[in-house]
């Protein structure tokens, strides 16, 4: 209720923001504060959620604040400094991309994975400059972590360098990998299973995400309490009713050859309702922190002289995986700040270790298959990829967090298999949320063949906003007329400028924020102006209120009856080189032009350079294009059924004759 934008992981919203959509309040200081507070309680409360998603949004918000260089809440402004050069949408978007990379680097201590995550998943527009910017940002982030972690030891050696690490994977046999080459086939099968788990999770999450769109704030609060109650009940009742007590090994047993890491894991085992010297297997997974749980699944093993002993039985792993994954599937998109990376890896590690039990059970000698920790790592990678469809970033992140290169091939195979299988059924979880929330996200290209080869089934004239004609203004107009246009069309952010003295041809465009700024500074003239260079506002004045420009409804933009008859000269503020496209250009060309250039509006013109419509981002979304395609097909069927029917000249282009000049 305090800040709704702070709920959820925030990754779909940040991905849409970096795609060119200005989502209100997504990077505000209030949102970041509530996000930080919320994720602290959700993670510490034991919910199946992670901190990497909120860390991405928090890092993006900090970067956006630095790019803006001022804060109305804190009352400071750095317009006098070089920060003013960053006050534009392009620079702010690049800063936000760097902040997202820093969030991943801070969450996992993986700077390279942070860069690759933004490249693969978040940023829609990439450049060489942005590459080294994100790399430098991640470098400073991890370096800061090093300083903080080493402060207690006088900036000397550190016991742990990462905020979330997976422990050290040691080689069982010296100079030999922990797995055989023929096991890559098994790892592929685990990747397929992980892809299926991810697809089912996305399907369940989609069902609940759709329901949340119609839920009230009270219902969402009740849902959060029910999820918390369910999770607490599972964490307590399952170990209580089904917990298996197993003898705790002696960490000082020299014959067991335990490392210091394994001795720490033995100390973290939970006794819960078991006799002294024993530990409850389920409680050792449910009652501990996510970092400890995943380490137990990766590294906890039996003594070397008794490798047949099960540290976590198959029943224990299933009783942990099934309810944990079920609650996690419902939790995605809930009104609680939290990410999906860490929970999916924990569930995947339990599933992978369980599958490892099955393979090793067929080997009485215990030396044919890889150790259970290897299968747990591959399972974690496959479930993560099956849910998020990440490949490069997921592989590098796991490699950086494990600190070993021997698992490059198993991880690559697992994430690719998980991605391919998941894509056979549905979209990635963040893409699913973007579609359900109807965020105007534009993919890199159209789905091939969906609207004809290269989109030739539709043209720019088909997809433009035909429900209303384009609202145009003149280079010199009355203040009252312009005020009425702005007041009656609050959703239009760009107006084509046509010259009535030249046959109403398009001469440029002008932004709504520019017009409102002119009203704010009362740039009116009593007589019709002739010289456009007298008394103009400078570029610095036009941009000084970025990003919160004045609107026509603000008191400082109000006008009186006398001012309505004044004139306003727009010639010095017109963009004389706007992007335009012909009404008969194919949808494929229109889409690529709009998407690759990062446009927010595109003028559609005819052969006489007259504006016939405007294309905005919402006109190019998948739902809008599908609707227009159906209308075009129905119009053509009607025309074929009644060829002698008269065609209304005022009807939209969909009912006009086929393009005589061909598709451009």
Image (cartoon, rainbow, N blue to C red):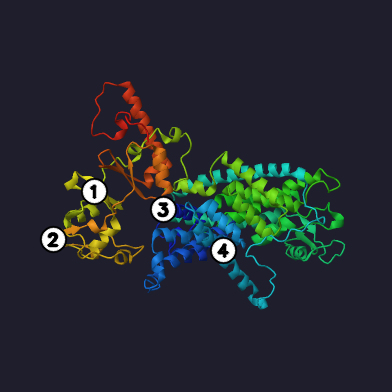
Disc tally is 4
Question: Which of the two discs, 4 and 1, labels the residue nearer the N terminus?
Answer: 4
Q: Is residue 195 left or right of residue 243?
A: left
Question: Which of the two discs, 2 and 3, labels the residue nearer the N terminus?
Answer: 3
Question: Which of the two discs, 2 and 4, labels the residue nearer the N terminus?
Answer: 4
**Residue furthest bottom in the image:** 154
Q: Residues under labels 4 and 1: Cα distance?
A: 46 Å
Residue depicted at 57% across the width and 49% down the height = 388
Q: Is residue 237 left or right of residue 567?
A: right
Q: Residues under labels 2 and 1: Cα distance?
A: 23 Å
Q: Residues under labels 2 and 4: Cα distance?
A: 57 Å
Question: Which of the two discs, 3 and 4, labels the residue nearer the N terminus?
Answer: 3
Can you identify the residue that label 2 sits on? 561
Mark 4 burial class by Cα count in 10 Å: few <14, some 14-19, many 20+: many
Residue depicted at 61% across the width and 54% down the height = 343
SS at circle 1: loop
Q: Where is residue 77? Give x, y as percent.
A: 38, 72
Residue 648: image tag:
none
Residue 138: image tag:
4
Q: Is residue 443 above or below residue 10?
A: above
SS at circle 3: loop
Q: Is residue 552 visible?
A: no
Q: Is residue 475 left or right of residue 102?
A: left
Is disc 2 in contact with disc 1, using a CB cutoff of under 8 Å?
no
Question: Which of the two discs, 3 and 1, labels the residue nearer the N terminus?
Answer: 3
Please name whichever residue, 497 or 319, is drawn nearer the observer in this view of the structure: 497
Please name whichever residue, 258 or 200, is drawn nearer the observer in this view of the structure: 258
Q: Nearer the viewer, mark 2 or mark 1?
A: 1
Can you identify the residue that label 1 sits on? 472
Q: Where is residue 159? Give x, y as percent.
A: 70, 70
């Amino acid at each position: 209720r305090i800040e709704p934008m702070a709920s959820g992981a925030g990754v779909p919203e940040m991905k849409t923001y970096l795609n060119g959509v200005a989502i209100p309040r997504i990077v505000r200081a209030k949102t970041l504060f509530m996000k930080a507070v919320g994720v602290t309680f959700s993670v510490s409360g034991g919910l199946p959620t992670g901190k990497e998603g909120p860390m991405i949004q928090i890092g993006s918000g900090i970067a956006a604040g630095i790019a803006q260089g001022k804060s109305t809440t804190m009352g400071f402004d750095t317009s006098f400094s070089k920060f003013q050069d960053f006050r534009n949408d392009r620079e702010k978007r690049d800063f936000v991309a760097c902040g997202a990379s820093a969030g991943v680097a801070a969450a996992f201590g993986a700077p390279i994975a942070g860069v690759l995550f933004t490249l693969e998943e978040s940023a829609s527009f990439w450049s060489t400059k942005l590459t080294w910017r994100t790399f430098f940002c991640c470098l400073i982030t991890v370096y800061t972590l090093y300083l903080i972690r080493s402060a207690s030891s006088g900036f000397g050696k550190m016991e742990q360098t990462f905020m979330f690490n997976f422990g050290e994977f040691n080689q069982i046999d010296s100079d030999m990998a922990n797995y055989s080459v023929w096991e890559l086939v098994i790892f592929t099968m685990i990747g397929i299973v992980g892809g299926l788990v991810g697809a089912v999770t996305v399907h369940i999450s989609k069902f609940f995400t759709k329901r949340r769109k119609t839920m009230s704030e009270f219902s969402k609060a009740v849902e959060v309490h029910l999820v918390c109650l369910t999770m607490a009940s599972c964490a307590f009742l399952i170990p209580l009713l089904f917990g298996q007590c197993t003898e705790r090994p002696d960490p000082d047993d020299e014959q067991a050859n335990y490392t210091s890491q394994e001795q720490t894991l033995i100390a973290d085992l939970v006794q819960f309702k078991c006799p002294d010297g024993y530990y409850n297997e389920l409680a050792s997974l449910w009652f501990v922190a996510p970092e400890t749980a995943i380490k137990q699944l990766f590294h906890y093993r039996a003594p070397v002289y008794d490798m047949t002993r099960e540290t976590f039985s198959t029943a224990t792993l299933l009783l942990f995986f099934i309810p944990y994954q079920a609650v996690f599937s419902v939790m995605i998109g809930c009104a609680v700040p939290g990410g999906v990376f860490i929970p999916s890896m924990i569930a995947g590690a339990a599933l992978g270790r369980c599958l490892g039990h099955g393979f090793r059970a067929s080997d009485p000698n215990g030396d044919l298959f890889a150790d259970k920790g290897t299968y747990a790592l591959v399972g974690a990678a496959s479930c993560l990829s099956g849910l998020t469809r990440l490949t490069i970033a997921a592989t590098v992140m796991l490699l950086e967090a494990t600190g070993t290169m021997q698992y490059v091939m198993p991880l690559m195979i697992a994430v690719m298999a998980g991605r391919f299988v998941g894509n056979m059924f549905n979209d990635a979880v963040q893409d699913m949320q973007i579609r359900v929330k109807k965020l105007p996200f534009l993919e890199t290209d159209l789905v091939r063949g969906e609207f004809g080869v290269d989109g030739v089934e539709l043209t720019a004239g088909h997809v433009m906003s035909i429900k209303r004609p384009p609202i145009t203004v003149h280079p010199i107009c009355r203040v009252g007329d312009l005020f009425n246009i702005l007041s009656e069309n609050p959703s239009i952010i760009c107006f084509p400028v046509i010259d009535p003295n030249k046959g109403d041809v398009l001469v440029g465009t002008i932004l709504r924020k520019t017009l409102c700024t002119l009203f704010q500074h009362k740039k009116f003239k009593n007589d019709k102006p002739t010289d456009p260079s007298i008394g103009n506002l400078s570029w610095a004045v036009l941009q000084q209120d970025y990003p919160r420009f004045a609107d026509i409804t603000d008191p400082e933009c109000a006008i009186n009856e006398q001012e309505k008859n004044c004139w306003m000269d727009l010639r010095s503020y017109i963009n004389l080189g706007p992007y335009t496209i012909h009404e008969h250009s194919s949808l494929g060309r229109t889409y690529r032009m709009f998407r690759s250039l990062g446009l927010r509006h595109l003028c559609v013109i005819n052969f006489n350079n007259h504006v016939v419509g405007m294309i905005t981002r919402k006109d190019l979304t998948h739902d809008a294009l599908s609707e227009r395609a159906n209308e075009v097909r129905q119009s053509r069927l009607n025309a074929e059924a009644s060829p002698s029917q008269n065609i209304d000249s005022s009807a939209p282009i969909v009912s006009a004759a086929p393009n005589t000049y061909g598709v451009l």
